[in-house]
Amino acid sequence: MQYDKNNVFYKIINRELNANIILEGEHFLAFHDIAPKAPVHVLVIPKGCYVDYYDFVLNASDTEILDFCRGTAEIIKMMKIEKPGFKLVANAGKFSMNDEKGQEVMHFHFHILGKPLDDND
Ligand code: AMP
C-alpha cells in the first residue's frame, strides 16, 4: 500500500496536531493513545513514512529500526511495565480479531499496553 500523508500521525510528527508526547528520538516519537485501552497505552511511531510493520522492516534503514526498537524498550522501562509484563500490538491492514478493528491509522505504530506495579503487588 502507498503511504498517504493525510493521516493523524504524520500531522503529529510535523506538529500540526498536538499529542501527549512522552519521548522523542532521532527517528521515533512516543505519545499516549488518545483513547487508552489499558492503564498504560502508549503509541510508538517512526518519524519516517511507513504504512505498517512489514513496510517499516523491509524499507527503513538499520539506524531507524534500531532507534525505534530501543525507543520502545525505553518506554517500557519508563512506564514501569517490564516486570509485570506488557503487550505489544501492531495492526496491519483490515485483519482483526475479537471484535477489534483493524488498522485505523495508516502510519506504522506499536501499541504498548500494560499496567505498572503498584504498592500492593
Ligand atoms: P490502530 O487501530 O492500530 O491503527 O490504532 C490507532 C490508534 O491511534 C487508536 O488506538 C487511537 O485511539 C489512536 N489515536 C488516533 N488519533 C490519535 C491522536 N490524535 N492522538 C493519540 N492517539 C490517537
Image (cartoon, rainbow, N blue to C red):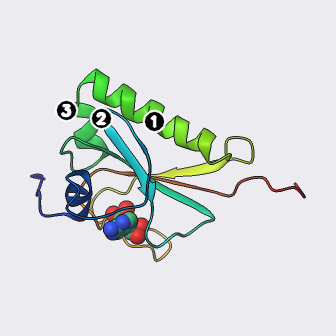
Kindly identify the amino acid type of the residue bearing the numbered disc 1: Gly
Tag 3 residue? 59
Q: From the viewer's perspective, is residue 30 above or below residue 5?
A: above
Q: Point out which mark residue 90 bears.
A: none
Q: Secondary structure at mark 2?
A: loop
Residue bearing mark 1: 71
Residue 99 visible, this orientation: yes
Residue receiving disc 2: 27
Q: Residue at x 52, y 69 (%)?
A: 36
Do residues under tags 1 and 2 come within 8 Å of each other at their CB atoms? yes
| Mark in the foreground, 3 or 2 | 2
SS for dot 3: helix
Residue 106 at what x, y percent from top left? Answer: 23, 59
Quadrant position of the C terminus in the picture:
bottom right
Residue at point 22% right, 41% down?
A: 55
Expressed as whole percent of the image width and height from the top left, the position of residue 23 reads: 44, 44
Frontmost residue, 81 versus 1: 81
Rounded to the nearest angstrom, the CA distance separating label 1 from label 3 is 19 Å
Asked if labels 2 and 3 touch by Cβ distance under 8 angstroms, the answer is: no
Q: State the SS at label 1.
A: helix
Mark 1–mark 2 distance (CA, rounded to whole Å): 9 Å
- Give the percent coordinates (x, y) of residue 53: 31, 44
Q: Amino acid at mark 2?
A: His
Of callouts 1 and 3, which one flags the residue occurring earlier in the amino acid sequence?
3
